[in-house]
Amino acid sequence: MRALRYFVSEAAASLWRGRGAAALAVLTIATGLFVLGFFLLVNTNLQQLIDRWSASAELSVYLNDGVTGEQLKDLDTLAERSGLVAERTYVSKAEALERFRSDFPDLAGAAGTLDSNPFPASFEWRVKPDLREASGAIEGLVAAVRHMPGVADVRYDRDWLARLNVVIRGARTAGVVVVVLLALAAGLTVANVVRLAAAARRDEIEIMQLVGAPFAYVRGPFVAEGVLQGGIAAVVALAGLAAAFFAFKARYGAAAAQALGADALVFLPPPLIALIVAGGMALGCVGGYAVARRVR
Amino acid sequence: MIDARHISKIYGRGIYALRDLSLQVDKGDFVFLTGPSGAGKSTFLKLLLRRDVPTEGRLVVGGRDLASLTPRQVQAYRRSIGFVFQDFKLLPNKTVLENVAFVPRVLGVAASQQQRRTFQVLKWVGLQHRMSAYPIELSGGEQQRVAIARAIVNDPVVILADEPTGNLDPDLSLEIMNLFREINARGTTVVVATHDRELIRRVGRRSVTLDHGRIVEVA
């Protein structure tokens, strides 16, 4: 505890002495963490949308106009026997038209000018939540349904959700690459700032070595200095991110939430905030240790 | 306490800083190392501080063979040694009190003990009234007294001093030597390197004269 107090007080004093260079290091780390936080924030809100879409993912079986009652019964039986369908809804042609009018009121007039109802009747089958990842079984059901008499077309939302997931995964990977590069730059900056601090304290270090101070006492302040820089940078990054987020939310929050189909945009949850702070401190620790290990 | 047997220190291109030097210093002794510049005085102190190791021979201090110490054993060894340099090596951004307390602090001594020991040694060297001053505000003699206080705050068994009076006038030099004599009187072994033969004469202790890395006279 005494040693820890010594490390922190020496590190704080050293940071204050070299506050110009330290501020540069803090800003560099903060930039990296801000970008990381931004990716996490976008991901958190997009995930809401994907979760909601995934939860409502359904299989739509569009029917021919001349579908018979027997064929409808066969389809219903197939859905029930598959064990994949949690909920089955029949949407008649009239209901489909009504939905269109309700969802697109601007086009409702145009639909009214048509001689006949162009919307097909359909079955909407909601897949059981625990079976949504069983893509093989669902694809088998889709193929079977597609060849049933009376069926015009089959659409399964999971297909495009899967494609969307691929795109999002790609974006995440790109984000990780950017964050890693920024982290590397931040680590090097911390190392350089700590190296400057080590040069400024070379007399102290020499005396510590001559009096036989334990390595932990000689090196500890450098590691603590890196950790402090990283921690401060994380707080700066989170403060910047929160300011940007809440400013955006105040101006475009309602529209963005509507676009995402969410109740409201959400900020980073506490575990991710803790992750960013820990990440900043770890980054600083690595930078500080890289210098400290050379001090003997 | 110090047992040097046939030690040599050779730097690049075969230059001997010390050549076949043998010297025994008993516990509680006060020894001057003297000789012209380049005689090997500072090199010998450097070996005693374990900042370097002999190229040949064996150097044992307090029963420890200095060449075979691990890094952690070097730390433990240095905790038993106090050192004083010609240029004082005080930390300019720390006060007198902080300079002296720095040693127990980095050795992990409890704060209350740090304070007690620091006050004691500063009082002993007569600088209790200058505790809040920075080194730049002190005279050369005062700075060297702070350095001595720092050297003894950890209660070492051996004090090594390299030209401790090199930057001081004769009266102040004698004053500093009197402090070393008092330290020695308490049982601490003292080794002082100086080229000031007049000072050695006035203090009147054993002196070992080196020249070109060899002992040429013991008086």
Image (tube, coloured by chain):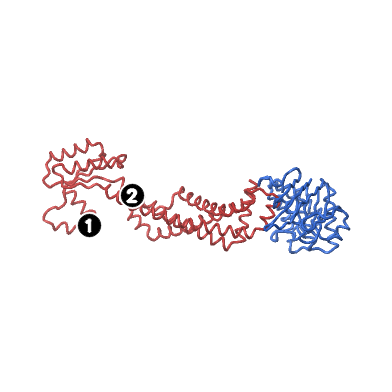
Chain colours: A red, B blue
Q: Which amino acid does label 2 sit on?
A: Ile
Residue A151 at what x, y percent from top left?
15, 45
The residue drawn where x is 16% and y is 49% is: A120
In the shown orientation, is residue A265 left or right of residue A136? right
Residue B149, by quadrant, is: bottom right
Mark closer to the chain start, 1 or 2: 2
Can residue B188 be seen here? Answer: no
Q: Residue at x 62, y 61 (%)?
A: A17
- Tell me which amino acid carries mark 1: Pro
Q: Rounded to the nearest whole Å, what is the CA distance between mark 1 and mark 2?
A: 26 Å
Badge 1 density bin: few <14, some 14–19, many ≥20, Cα 10 Å: few
Residue at mark 1: chain: A
Nearer to me, A95 or A191: A191
Give the percent coordinates (x, y) of residue B121: 79, 52
Q: Mark 2 lies on which chain?
A: A
Between A8 and B148, the one lying in front of the other is B148
Disc assigned to residue A105: 1
Residue A21 location in percent, x, y?
A: 57, 62
Is disc 2 placed on a helix, strand or loop?
Answer: helix
Q: Mark 2 points at which residue?
A: A50
**Relative to B25, is A30 on the left or the right?**
left
- Residue ranking furthest to the front: B14
